[in-house]
Amino acid sequence: MTISPKYQLIRQDLGKVLKNSLIFLGPALLVFIPALAKQIPAEAGYGALVLYVLNLLADLLRKFLATSRYK
């Protein structure tokens, strides 16, 4: 078992963040892709991408502040 101590990021933390970033990207793409096709206002699409980045940063911060264990 690998332990990720508080205030440190290890490779497994970054792997989890990457996985979560792909999950967070799904809803953002659902909004952004139609924006590219001019079906919805572009501002809504950009807002979705901003939400994606904020979710990614929140997940990275959560991993940084917590002690994690990986199998």
Image (cartoon, helix red, strand yellow):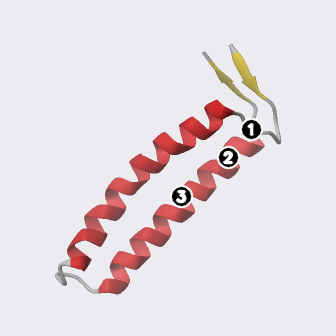
Residue type, mark 2 in image: Arg
**Given contact means CB atoms under 8 Å apart, are the residues at marks 3 and 2 in contact?**
no
Among the two numbered marks 1 and 3 on one chain, the one whose residue lies closer to the N terminus: 3
**SS at circle 2:** helix
Q: Which residue is mark 2?
A: 62
Residues under numbered marks 1 and 3 in contact, where contact means CB atoms less than 8 Å apart: no
**Seen in the image, is 70 located left or right of residue 66?**
left
- Structural distance between the alpha carbons of marks 1 and 2: 6 Å
Residue under numbered circle 3 = 55
**Residue name at image x 36 percent, y 63 percent:** 28
The residue drawn where x is 43% and y is 69% is 49
Q: Are marks 1 and 2 in contact (CB under 8 Å)?
A: yes
Task: Place residue 45 in its image quadrant.
Answer: bottom left
Asked which quadrant contains residue 58, the reply is: bottom right
Up the image or down, 67 lies above or below 65; here it is above
Q: Position of residue 22 (x, y in %)?
A: 41, 48
Residue at label 1?
A: 66
Residue 26: image location, x then y, percent: 33, 54
Structural distance between the alpha carbons of marks 3 and 2: 10 Å
Of helix, strand and loop, which one carries label 1? Answer: loop
Q: State the image coordinates of residue 65 (x, y, percent, origin top left).
A: 76, 44
